[in-house]
Image: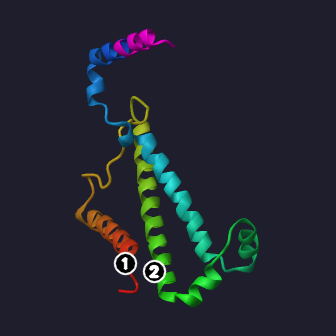
Amino acid sequence: MDPQHAAEAVSEISTMVSGDPYLEYQPAFAYSLPIQLFVGGITLTLLAVLLMHLLCKFDDLHRVFTELMVVTTQYHYPLAPLNYCLQLSSIVTVFLSVLVKIWFVLDYSAKSADKWPYDLDYIAVSIPPKSWTVAQDAAWFLLQALNIGLSNVCPWS
């Protein structure tokens, strides 16, 4: 495509965008439901692999995973038991948090898709929603505080 055609295409697109009043209310792509689910799924997968890596002390799993990756559990725990326990509790807490987020987003999407116009929202689901009770909000913020605390604690200080 030559520069003149590219400039014409850009001006045509900008004319279309300026002519559509709904596009100014559309959020950025990073705040969309597909990206929210995509990032949550990748995070959940990576945490599951890390959790299997830390818990891989059983013989059957150990045999399978040693062929795929270097497993350090049998060496890590005897050298630094406090560090190992902090890593394990942090991973479990973050895994639970991401699982709750994905469950809530999918539940919200399933409920909204059962009503007219039978489609999914483009906008990402906000967590915690305004409809939660004080107890639900407190539980959610406690889980987030545990995430931050366990992920950033320094065992040697």
Is residue 114 in view?
A: no
Counting the numbered discs, the total is 2
Seen at 58% across and 83% down, the residue is 76
Residue furthest bottom in the image = 78
Relative to 45, say whether 37 is above or below: above
Q: Which mark is residue 94?
A: none
Locate residue 18, reporting x and y percent: 27, 17
How far apart are the two marked residues, 2 and 1, measured between alpha carbons?
8 Å
Tell me the chief SS of the magenta region.
Answer: helix
User: Which is nearer the eye, 150 or 99?
Assistant: 150
Q: Which mark is residue 86?
A: 2
**Residue 91 counted in the magenta span:** no
Residue furthest front in the image = 3
Q: Report which residue position mark 1 lands on.
A: 153
Seen at 38% across and 16% down, the residue is 10
**Residue 133, quarter of picture:** bottom left
Q: Secondary structure at mark 1?
A: loop
Seen at 24% across and 52% down, the residue is 130
- Earlier in the chain: of badge 2 and badge 1, it is 2
Kindly indicate whether the residue at mark 1 contacts the one at mark 2 (C-beta within 8 angstroms): yes
**Hey, what amino acid is under mark 1?**
Val
**Residue 6 counted in the magenta span:** yes
Locate residue 87, reporting x and y percent: 48, 76
Locate residue 6, reporting x and y percent: 43, 14
Magenta segment: 1-11
Q: Which quarter shows the C terminus?
A: bottom left
**Hey, what amino acid is under mark 2?**
Leu
Is residue 22 in view?
A: yes
